[in-house]
Amino acid sequence: MRDADITKVCEIAAAVAANHKGFWVDVARVGSFGSAARVLWVGIDRNDALLTLQKDLDEQLSAAGWGGDKKQFAGHLTLCRIKKLKAGRILKEFIKDYSDLSLGSFGVDSICVYKSELTSSGPIYTVISTNSLKKPNN
């Protein structure tokens, strides 16, 4: 991605953030991606504010020339990636007992743009910009 593209993405994130209020999300469910777990995650319960924010951000990025994501959005937090297939199979079985786990809530107050750099020892994530959401009415 060129510097001009990065600047535009940051501008879009800032504009979208300026139009949305902060909100709370509930963290529940433990799951994985892959037939043998490759990614371990915890889910974000359905949240209209999060879905509206994601849709607005996706539409603005699409309008600027970055194609939108065709998959349905599923809010989640990635906990780890699993490299070994055997470990992924074991983990997939283990987490079945925790699929309904409720882990609490946290406040969402900003949109961050990250740079992802893949290295031989794993990805390095660097925050490029942080854009505050509007303060919610209390």
Image (cartoon, rainbow, N blue to C red):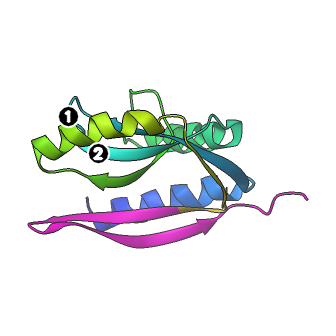
Q: Magenta part of the protein: which range? A: 112-138
Q: Residue furthest right?
A: 138
Work out whether 59 lies above or below 27. Answer: above
Q: Give the residue drawn at x 29%, y 45%.
A: 39
The secondary element bearing badge 1 is classed as loop
Q: Residue 75: percent from the left, percent from the top?
A: 51, 41
- Residue 67 appears in the rendering: no
Work out whether 86 lies above or below 1. Answer: above
Could you say which is closer to the camera, residue 11 or residue 43?
A: 43
Question: What's the magenta bit mostly, secondary-structure-wise?
Answer: strand
Q: Amino acid at mark 2?
A: Val
Give the Cα distance between marks 1 and 2.
Answer: 9 Å
Q: Give the residue drawn at x 46%, y 27%.
A: 72
For disc 2, the marked residue is: 39
Q: Give the residue drawn at x 71%, y 52%.
A: 24
- Residue 99 appears in the rendering: yes
The secondary element bearing badge 2 is classed as strand
Q: Amino acid at mark 1?
A: Ala
Q: Which mark is residue 26?
A: none
Q: Is residue 76 magenta?
A: no
Q: Quadrant of the C terminus?
A: bottom right
Q: Residues within 10 Å of mark 2 (few under 14, many from 20)?
A: some
Q: Residue 73: percent from the left, percent from the top?
A: 48, 33
Mark 1 vs mark 2: give the one in front: 1
Q: Quadrant of the N terminus?
A: bottom left
For disc 1, the marked residue is: 36
